[in-house]
Image (cartoon, rainbow, N blue to C red):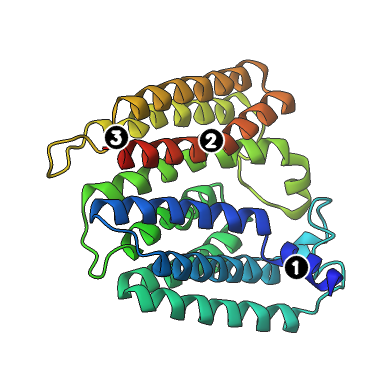
């Protein structure tokens, strides 16, 4: 059982899955606060459903890339390439998770379930094969990667309606993914080349790739400040002064790390940028939530 759980965690990419669920949960709480009450049962349904759907998408990803995972040091111990799990077993587990997760999210409302299915399809069947064809894969992957805030926010409502709040939450996570993934791609460039993945903007660790990474962190600063500009029906800004100050400081520090990568163009600088990206997004989301609740 212990070995199965270890393999299962690797199949669903547990840390990535938990990060996605965290993002959706935070945005669910924002949506709930906006309408005045938190339905904790729905929060549990969202958390479990989001976990299953994300796990399914990651499972399909590993099934498709099973032969490529054998070529990379960081992935050769995953359950399928290591021989601990057959493709059929992984497929059954992924299908069960995908169907169960979608069913749970559909119970919340139709748009939430549809977005979940769309995210699985886009991540597993469009982004995954595109990684070996063109660097545009990062742009494609940024869409399913930014859907958790939309899914979480919409899940808080019985009848979701489009407003600027979920759009802003989506945009912040969308833009953040470019420096995040390009930093990872820089660090793992040698490993990725073994599998033929083309994820850096120019497919090389060169000045242009470093510049585009820096440009994305610069763009992220005004995007992250959008909550301080958008006014809700109450007349208050979606994000307050505390959020604005933290978003600006975090954005400038993120940008500074990208400047270091542009100047040095080495793996050490890329690692620092990557580590910063891990903390940047949850910091902004938690600050925005607490700032929002305090109103």
Q: Do the residues labelled 1 and 3 touch (CB within 8 Å)?
A: no
Disc number lying in front (1 or 3)? 3
Q: Residue furthest top?
A: 263
Could you tell me how far apart the alpha carbons at marks 1 and 2 are, in whole angstroms? 27 Å
Q: Nearer the viewer, residue 15 or 236?
A: 236
Tell me the quarter of the picture where residue 240 sits: top left
Q: In the image, which disc is placed on residue 66?
A: 1
> Which numbered disc, 1 or 2, marks the residue that appears first in the sequence?
1
For mark 2, what is the residue?
Answer: 179
Q: Nearer the viewer, residue 255 or 44?
A: 44
Question: On the rendered image, what quadrant is the C terminus found in?
Answer: top left
For mark 3, what is the residue?
Answer: 239
Tell me residue 273's x, y (percent): 61, 29
Q: Would you place residue 209 above or below residue 43 in this image?
A: above
Could you tell me how far apart the alpha carbons at marks 1 and 3 are, in whole angstroms? 43 Å
Q: Which of 48 and 252 is in front in this view?
A: 48
> Which numbered disc, 2 or 3, marks the residue that appears first in the sequence?
2
């Amino acid at each position: 059982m212990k070995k199965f759980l270890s393999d299962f965690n690797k199949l669903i990419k547990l840390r990535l899955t938990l990060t996605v669920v965290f993002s959706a949960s935070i945005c669910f709480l924002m949506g709930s606060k906006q309408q005045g009450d938190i339905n904790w049962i729905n929060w549990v349904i969202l958390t479990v459903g989001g976990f299953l759907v994300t796990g399914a998408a990651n499972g399909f990803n590993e099934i498709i890339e099973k032969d490529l995972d054998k070529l990379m040091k960081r992935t050769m111990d995953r359950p399928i390439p290591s021989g601990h799990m057959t493709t059929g077993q992984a497929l059954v587990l992924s299908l069960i998770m995908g169907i169960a997760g979608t069913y749970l999210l559909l119970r919340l409302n139709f748009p939430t379930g549809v977005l979940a299915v769309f995210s699985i399809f886009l991540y597993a069947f469009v982004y995954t094969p595109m990684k070996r064809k063109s660097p545009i894969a990062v742009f494609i992957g940024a869409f399913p990667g930014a859907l958790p805030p939309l899914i979480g926010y919409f899940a808080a409502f019985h009848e979701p309606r489009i407003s600027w709040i979920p759009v802003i939450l989506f945009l912040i996570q969308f833009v953040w993914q470019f420096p995040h993934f390009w930093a990872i791609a820089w660090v793992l460039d040698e490993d990725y080349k073994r599998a033929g993945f083309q994820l850096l903007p120019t497919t090389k660790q060169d000045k242009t790739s470093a510049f585009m990474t820096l440009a994305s962190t610069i763009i992220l600063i005004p995007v992250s400040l959008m909550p301080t500009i958008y006014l809700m029906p109450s007349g208050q800004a979606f994000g307050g002064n505390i959020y604005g100050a933290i978003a600006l400081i975090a954005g400038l520090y993120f940008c500074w790390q990208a400047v270091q990568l542009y100047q040095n163009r080495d793996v050490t600088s890329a690692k620092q940028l990557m580590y910063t990206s891990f903390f940047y997004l949850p910091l902004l989301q938690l600050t925005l939530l607490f700032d929002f609740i305090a109103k």
